[in-house]
Image: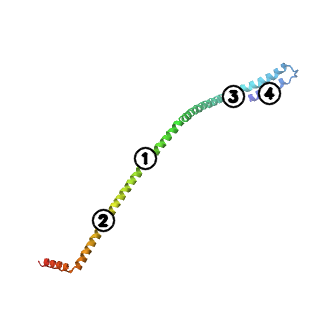
Amino acid sequence: MRKLFFILALLLSANILAAGGGKGSPLDLKMPFLNFFLLFGTLAYMLRGKLSAMFTQNSKDVAFQFEASEKKSKEAAIKLEMYQKKIADLPLEEKRIIQDAENEVNRFQDTLVKKNKDYINRLQKEVENRLTNEEKRMEMMVRNQLADSIINQVKDTIKNNSTNVNKVNQKLLAKVRS
């Protein structure tokens, strides 16, 4: 209530002091200046706690923002340095990647050549084994045919030559009787 009365008195005094008849001289401004000083002085006095708290909070906020900005600035500087190093190392990295790729290609070619040689050797061995087996089978077949033809010729000769048949029969009978 006291504050309200004080503000009302201040406003009334400002109206009374400002209501003079002005003559256009700089002295006519002393009453408005006094009114201004009284009004804002009183307001500043009454609101000094809130103003002080507001300015304190603003200073803390500014300090926090400044620290955060400094941290972000340092992080940005570190990232910038890191990216600059990467960019500076880019030709070396490119050469290393190309060299690695060439080594991989050479290794792959060597492996492929070795696998192909092994495959060719295995196929050659298989072919040699098949040829050897086929040769043995053919030899066996030729021997059997030769033996069959000889047996057939001997049979024909024995059948055609009756004297030989009689001699053989007699010899066999003699052996059986004995």
Q: Which residue is rendered at x = 42% and y = 49% of the image? A: 113
Sort mark 1 into few (<14), some (14-19) or many (20+) by Cα contacts within 10 Å.
few
Q: Which residue is rendered at x = 78% and y = 26% of the image? A: 10
Counting residues from the start of the chain, the first of labels 2 and 4 encountered is 4
| CA distance for labels 2 and 1 | 43 Å
| CA distance for labels 3 and 2 | 121 Å
Residue carrying label 1: 110
Residue carrying label 2: 139
| CA distance for labels 1 and 3 | 83 Å
Residue carrying label 4: 11
Say which of marks 2 and 4 sits in front. 2
Q: Nearer the viewer, residue 109 or 150?
A: 150
Q: Please tell me whether mark 1 sits on a helix, a strand or a loop.
A: helix
Q: Is residue 53 above or below residue 118?
A: above
Q: Position of residue 72 (x, y in %)?
A: 59, 33
Say what amino acid the circle numbered 2 marks. Glu
Q: Please tell me whether mark 4 sits on a helix, a strand or a loop.
A: helix
Say what amino acid the circle numbered 3 marks. Leu
Q: Which residue is rendered at x = 44% and y = 45% of the image? A: 107
Q: Nearer the viewer, residue 164 or 74?
A: 164
Q: Is residue 171 left or right of residue 70?
A: left
Q: Is residue 118 above or below residue 100?
A: below
Quarter of the figure with residue 19: top right
| CA distance for labels 2 and 4 | 139 Å
Residue carrying label 3: 51
Q: Is residue 70 left or right of residue 26?
A: left
